[in-house]
């Protein structure tokens, strides 16, 4: 049986240069091809009119251009959503499935991007971790999610386009840092048709300390969000066993303090309130102690119901008391609304549909 040709969209720019060199072609052609693929979004090599016929033929013989296929497209109809939140289930070139979400809120249109198929961290409150890790996504597979969501937006309204990107979907972005950075490089290329400021992009992590330090050193001006969920080491280990044991809170706090000192940018601490688990007055005090001493803001979020995961969200009175204590401690705190819960598109819910439903034939 003949092996399928590799997908050229999976190549990084450096890999594309190497591939061209092996074909006896000048490496500068790589930038042209990359622009055809990711700016013009060419669907076949014949469309690359600035390339010679011979090169186009070589490329067609060596590669395919295969974008992810939309398996399902769901819209949230919850009253709280206002404008619809939309979720795509995408089938990748090798058959793996990932989900990506378009979130509309208060003058923003945010693409929530997955960085892995599945996740290895197995956090207790997250559906993605129940699937295990299948593989890292390529940079091309991440940019494809943004393009697919942006197409949905512009189809609804030609003046509407994505304003923000968050790497908060399936997977741990900082276990796939090279490809995440490569995707960001493409998504922020100034001469490309789709281009955002890096300040409009957020990378979320469970706290992968070496990669946080790497981000601080590389000078990439994206935002950083850390899924904390408890500032008590023992409690955090019950909620996020792999992350908490591999990256203890004391070391994580030092890495975050170093990050903010080096970059001058605040870190967002994301804290999901769970009824009877991490919502007490003592939990608030512990979080306040952790957050003092470095630039940060705290996002409180509600738990979103997930099948076979038995947590409960807190009531509004508990949330308000928790928030008030942090604010009285001098911290900047916001309560982040969840969008798309009815279609399993909210925080922690991604992969739920892929797990429950067999892949269409």
Image: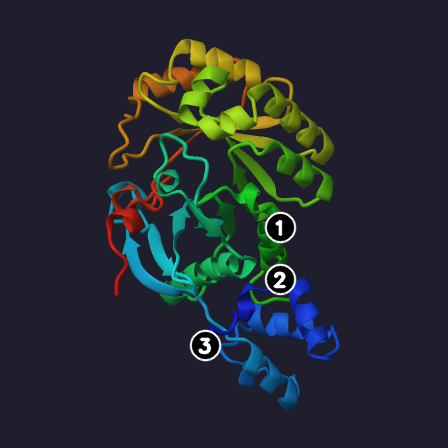
Which of the two discs, 3 and 2, labels the residue nearer the N terminus? 3
Find disc 1 in the rendering and name its residue: 178
Residue 332, position as x, y percentages in the image: 53, 24
In this picture the colour scheme is rainbow
Label 1 – label 2 distance at C-alpha: 10 Å
Residue 11's image quarter? bottom right
Q: Are marks 1 and 2 in contact (CB under 8 Å)?
A: yes
**Compared with residue 52, is residue 185 higher up or lower down, i.e. above or below?**
above
Q: Is residue 178 left or right of residue 113?
A: right
* Quadrant (top left/top right/bottom left/bottom right) for the N terminus: bottom left
Q: Within 10 angstroms of label 2, few (less than 14), some, or many (20 or more) residues?
A: many
Q: Nearer the viewer, mark 3 or mark 1?
A: 3
**Dot 3: element:** loop
Residue 268, given in percent of the width and then of the height, sits at 54, 32
The residue under label 3 is: 2
Report which residue position mark 2 lands on.
12
- On the question of residue 114 being in view, the answer is no
């Amino acid at each position: 049986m003949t092996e399928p040709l590799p997908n050229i969209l999976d190549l990084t720019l450096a890999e594309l240069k190497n591939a061209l060199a092996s074909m006896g072609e000048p490496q500068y052609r790589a930038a042209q091809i990359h622009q055809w693929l990711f700016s013009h979004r060419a669907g076949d090599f014949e469309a690359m009119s600035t390339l010679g016929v011979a090169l186009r033929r070589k490329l067609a013989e060596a590669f395919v251009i295969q974008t992810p296929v939309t398996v399902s497209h769901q819209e949230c109809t919850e009253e709280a959503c206002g404008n619809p939140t939309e979720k795509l289930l995408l089938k990748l070139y090798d058959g793996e499935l990932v989900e990506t979400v378009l979130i509309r809120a208060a003058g923003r249109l945010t693409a929530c991007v997955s960085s892995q198929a599945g996740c290895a961290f197995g956090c207790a409150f997250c559906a993605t971790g129940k699937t295990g890790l299948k593989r890292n996504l390529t940079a091309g597979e991440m940019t494809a999610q943004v393009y697919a969501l942006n197409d949905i937006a512009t189809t609804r309204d030609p003046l509407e386009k994505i304003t923000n990107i968050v790497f908060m979907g399936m997977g741990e972005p900082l276990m796939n840092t090279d490809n995440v950075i490569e995707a960001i490089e493409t998504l922020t290329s100034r001469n490309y048709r789709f281009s955002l400021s890096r300040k409009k992009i957020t990378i979320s992590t469970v706290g992968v300390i070496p990669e946080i330090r790497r981000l601080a050193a590389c000078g990439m001006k994206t935002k950083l969000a850390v899924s904390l969920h408890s500032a008590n080491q023992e409690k955090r280990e019950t909620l996020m066993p792999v992350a908490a044991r591999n990256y203890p809170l004391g070391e994580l706090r030092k890495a975050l303090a170093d990050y903010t000192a080096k970059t001058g940018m605040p870190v967002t601490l994301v804290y999901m309130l769970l009824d009877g688990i991490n919502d007490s007055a003592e939990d608030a005090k512990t979080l306040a102690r952790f957050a003092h001493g470095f630039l940060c803001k705290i996002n409180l979020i509600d738990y979103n119901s997930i099948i076979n995961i038995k947590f409960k969200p807190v009531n509004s009175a508990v949330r308000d008391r928790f928030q008030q204590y942090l604010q009285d401690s001098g911290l900047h705190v916001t309560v982040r609304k969840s969008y798309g819960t009815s279609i399993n598109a909210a925080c922690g819910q991604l992969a739920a549909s892929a797990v429950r439903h067999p892949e269409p034939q």
